[in-house]
Each structure stands twice: as C-alpha cells, then as structure tokens.
Amino acid sequence: MISGFSWLRWSGIIFKEFIQLKRDRLTFAMVVGIPIMQLTLFGYAINSDPKNLPSAALIADHGPFGRAVLQGLDNSDYFRIVREISDAADADRLLAEGDVQFVVTIPGDFDRKLARGERPALFIEADATDPSATGNALAAVAGIVRASLARDLQGTLGRLAPLSDPVDIRVHRRYNPEGVTSFNIVPGLIGTILTMTMILLTGLAMTRERERGTFENLLATPALPIEVMTGKIVPYILIGLIQVSLLIAAAYFIFNVPMVGSLALLYLSVLIFIAANLTLGITFSSIARNQLQAMQMTFFFFLPSILLSGFMFPFRGMPQWAQWVGSIFPLTHFLRIVRGIMLKGNTFAELWPNLWPILAFISVVIALGLLVYRKTLD
Amino acid sequence: MDPGPAVDVRGLNKYFGKKHVVRDLSLQVRRGEIFGFLGPNGSGKTTSIRLLCGLLTPDSGSGTCLGFDIARETAAIKREVGYMTQRFSLWEDLTIRENLEFVSRMYGMKNRSRAVSEALENLGLSSRQGQLAGTLSGGWKQRLSLASCMLHNPHLLLLDEPTAGVDPRARRDFWDHINELAGSGITVLVSTHYMDEAERCHRLAYIAYGRLLVSGTSEEVIGSQALAGYEVTGPDLPRYAALLRGLPFPVQVTAFGATLHVVGSDSTALNDLAQRMKKEDSHDWKPISPGLEDVFISLMEKAEEDIT
C-alpha cells in the first residue's frame, strides 16, 4: 500500500523545526540580525554617491574669484575644504596618506587672467585609487565653478559670463589616471579573501577538535595550551601567504595593477593582517560550540566587514557613525594599506596611521580570547 | 621503599556552574591493582577521572596521583598517566600510524619510530598502518586507543568505559590484556557498567550523584549492604511482581526469564515475608545470595531517596 501524505506528520516536522530553531540561539540571531544589519547598512550607511569629500586648498592667489570658486566647491555637497595649504609637498603628503580626497589649486594670477578672459587654469588633483569615490564629484566640478563665478561675472564683467567656461579646469587623477576599477578591486580582494578564509579556517580548526572529542585527548597529553594554539595557527599563516602571493601575481600579471611601493612592506602588512584574522578565528572557535556556530560567527563578522570597509562602497560615502564602526574592522585599514603600497607607493611612516588600529584590534581580541579560553578548559 | 598509593585523594569537590558534580570524593588506589569505578550515567565518573589526571582542577580538596599533587603538578601527571577517553578521541582523518606518531611527539618521546612500530606489531595492525583510523570497527578503535595511551609507558592507566559497545570476545581479550598490564606493575583505574567486568577488578568503588557510596573488594561491597535475596517461581509472575512492588518495605523485583529476583535491604522483613508466602500461596521462594548488580541498584535507590 502506498502511504499517503500525513498532515500530522508534516506539521509535526514543522513544529519540531521551530523548536530547534528557537533553541539554536545563534541561528535565530542570524535570522533576525542579518536583515536588520543589511537594512541599516544599505539604507543608512552605504552611499555609492559619496558627498562631503575632504579636500585641501592650495592657494597661490588670494583674490575674490579664487575665493568664490573655493566657496562654491565648499558649499556644494561633494567637496568640503578642510585645510588650506601653501606648499605643493603638503598636497602630495595629504593625498598619499589619504587624509584628503582632493587638492584644489588656485594658481597665481588666477583673478587677473580671469578678468582678462584668458581662461586661467584651476587644478584639481584627486586620489583616484577608488574611482567610484571621486567620479561624481569630479563630474560636478565644472558646473559648480561656473555657478559660483556667475554672480561675480556681472556688470562690466558680464561679457565673460557667456563664455562656455571662464576657467580651464584641469583634473589630475592621481595613482589611477585611467580610473580603472580593477586597480581598486583587486587589491581589495586580497583583504576580503584573507578575512574570509583565515577566520573560517581557524574557527573550524579548534571547534573540529572539540566536536569530535579529540580535544580532550590533546589536553590529556603534556601539550601546553600555547603550543596548541600557536601550533594550530602556523599552517594557516602559510596558507594565507600562499593566497596573497597568488593574488598579487594575478593583480600584477593579469590585471596589470601597478606595484609602485615595496613588496617587503606589503608582506609585512599582510602578516599583521593575517595575525588579526587568525586571533579572531581562534577566539571564535573558543566561543563556538561546534563548527556550524564558528561558521555563523565568521559570516556575522565578514558581512559588515566588506560592506563598511570601503571594499564594496566608498568609505567616505558613509555617515560619520558608520565610518566609526567601519574603522574597527582590520579590513578597512588593510584596504588602505594595500592600495597605499601598490598604487601610491606609501612608505612605512605613511602606513602607520592604518597599521596601529590593526595592532590594537589584535591586542583586544587576544585579551578576549585568553579570557574565553581559560573558561573552556575547565 | 614503598612508593605510596597510585592515587590518594581526599575531599575532592567539583562544580559546573551551580551543579555539584563531584562531592567530597576520597579515594585510594594501590599500585598494581585494577580498580573498578562504577555508577549510573551522569554520576560523576568521567569528571572524577578528569580530576585525577589534571584535565580539571578541583574546586576544593587535595590529593596526589603517582605522588604528584593533582592541583599543582598536572604537567608531571600527564607525562606519567595514560588516559583513554570514553568516546574514541583519536584523529579519524589520520592513519593509524600517523595517530601514534602524533601522540608520541606530544609526549616528547625518543625513538618514536621504533616505539610506534612496536605498538603496531603488538596490536597486529602493522599491515594496516596506512588505514585511516576512522575506518576501523569499534573493537579495533578501542584497541588502538589503548595502544595510543600506552605508548609513553605510563605507570597509571585511566580508562573511561573502555568497552562500551564492544562485542564480548573483544571485551574478554581487552580484559586479558588489562590483567597482563596490572601483572607487570601498572595501576589501572577503569570505569564500567558491566558487572562481569566489575567482578574482574581487584577493588571497586560505587559512585552516584557525585558521591562515593562504597568501596572495597566485590565481597566487601556485597557484604557491606547485608541484602537478603530470593528467587521466586510460580504462575502469573508479572502480576505477582506488581503486587510485591507495593509492599510497605522497599524491595527490588527484577524479572529474569521465568523467575523473579526479589532483593531487599530490610532482611528481617523480607525473610518473614518469604516464610509467610511459602505457606500461603503457590509461589516458590528460594533464597539466593545477592550479586553486585543487586547491591548497586539498591545503593542507587537509596542515594535517590537521600537526594530527594
């Protein structure tokens, strides 16, 4: 006899599934947490049309027209003049360290040339490592300049107004003159792939031992906790280095991403970044009761990491609070480091502002991990 | 010179959160003896064993294991003790040989390769050394586990239900091996649920609800409880058993095929009842001497009453 579909059995299974879901707090947290997190991030934090980009003004002519242009840029949504500088070397430094997105230069004789209708040059240097962060702002420059001069070019100077462009705007896209997106994405991938694999692999490595009961055997031997923890980490450091080497080779040979800076410095930063992810993975594995939980925790960390780090969306496009949250993640700083070394040729001193937050992250996580590890031994 | 007992602990207590898992455990195990550790599931046997080998630190109490302090000298204890976990805890994704080699490295052994080869030969697994440990049957897994915890020549073996789920033949072989080891001077502490295994131990301890209830040789343990027992035969035994369970004094009534075993701690009351029943009804009451199992079940029930 063919047994028919039983509603009782069917509802019994549904009921059981709900009970288990309720017991499995972490899955439940993910079911509720992930949509809320995504909604907050995409709804409020992420903005693919970044505004209020910090800019510096290098002013050689303090005349009213130049002022008007700067005022106009500052009043627009896109630019925020945070600094006035007087030295071209300062401009290079600010761009290299990523403190500003643009440097606007008002050259000497700007006012006089403008008044004569000689179309003086207005220089805008942009940090174009992430083309999507600067694209819209640069597209708006011509309109902003024309509008901000329109009021002043009235009366006797009104004859200049009809000129299609009273100013010759020269944009210099630094580090990535052609605005190639892969220049930004490929270095970024080094960070995201490392985050994903390092945390996941170490997270699983310890929970696997616990889940299968082999951890107890390990503890019964004279092996010290420090030996077990570090011994488990080393293979993954090697795996991480292999991944990075593959990615760098692919970036260089296949995607033609330039390698302006020091390869040794890049590997040093990679090691620090790997350490940050491994310590987090080991800590997750001390908290997680099984491999599934370790995996869930990894995703819970990974998702905001890629969304808020500036990998998928321009970091400066996010509101202040989201930038603060984003600054916690090692990936945020690592992305800047990799772009800084590969595209800008940053030196150690220029990288330091992004290195110390990763080191701070490591120390906090280690402290947390040791706290948790003690508990799980007893 | 007398090296003192292999295990000598007093007043050990262990809590997991609010749960009092081991209560005032005092235990002496002499060198070279096989000491049986019995008790129902969840009674604290595994926790006690873990306290002895330094995997857990007691919340209070003190003692020595092979002369080392169990709270402070765990590193030394771990080097001298072989611990076989209840669940198969070798690496299933390593081969038999790789497992033994790994363990030998963990103990920092010299001549590792020779020690591993010898162990494989003793096991009779030399030809299968390249096989993954996870593919072994239950009996072989258990033998491999024993070989692995014997690898560093420990003086004390702690075996946590080593024969659970193993067929009778393998169990007998296993115990023959344990006897040999004890004969060569190694002390063995073994937890088990099997009565035949309990009887093969030199001395026993029974633990329930974290409390050690009795210890001694099996004769001493049986004698300590002074139980009276009868074997009852006759018609309609299930109904008769229900009747007996309703008696005003506690008796254990267990069905053994076509007979009932009736055991009680109140021996005068039970003897009186037996005399009366022999005259009054058609059932036959024959006195028997209670075994270890009867003693343990009686102990467990008494402990239950004490707790509730």
Image: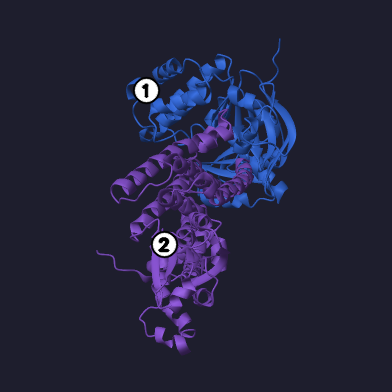
Chain colours: A purple, B blue
Residue at the farthest top position: B1
Q: Which amino acid type is shown beneath numbered disc 2?
A: Met
Q: Would you call the spot at circle 2 few (<14 residues within 10 Å), some (14-19), or many (20 or more)?
A: some
| A279 sits left or right of B68 in the view | left
Q: Is B199 situated above or below A270? A: above
Left or right: residue B274 compared with residue A312: right
Q: Nearer the viewer, residue A274 or A161?
A: A161
The single residue placed furthest to the bottom in the displayed view is: A155
Q: Looking at the image, is A315 positioned above or below residue A260?
A: below
The x and y percentages for residue B126 are 35, 20
Q: Say if residue A268 shows up in the picture.
A: yes
Residue depth check, mark 1 versus mark 2: number of the one nearer the observer: 2
Residue at the image point whose x is 39% and y is 53% from the top: A189
Q: Position of residue B296 (x, y in %)?
A: 62, 37
Q: Chain of mark 1?
A: B
Report x, y in % for residue B289. Answer: 61, 31
Residue position for label 1: B125
Q: Amino acid at mark 1?
A: Leu
Label 1, label 2: how far apart the Cα atoms are: 56 Å
**Residue A312 tag number:** 2
- The quadrant holding residue A323 is bottom right
For the point 40% across and 55% down, the residue is A175
Of A159 and A59, nearer the camera is: A159
Mark 2: secondary structure? loop
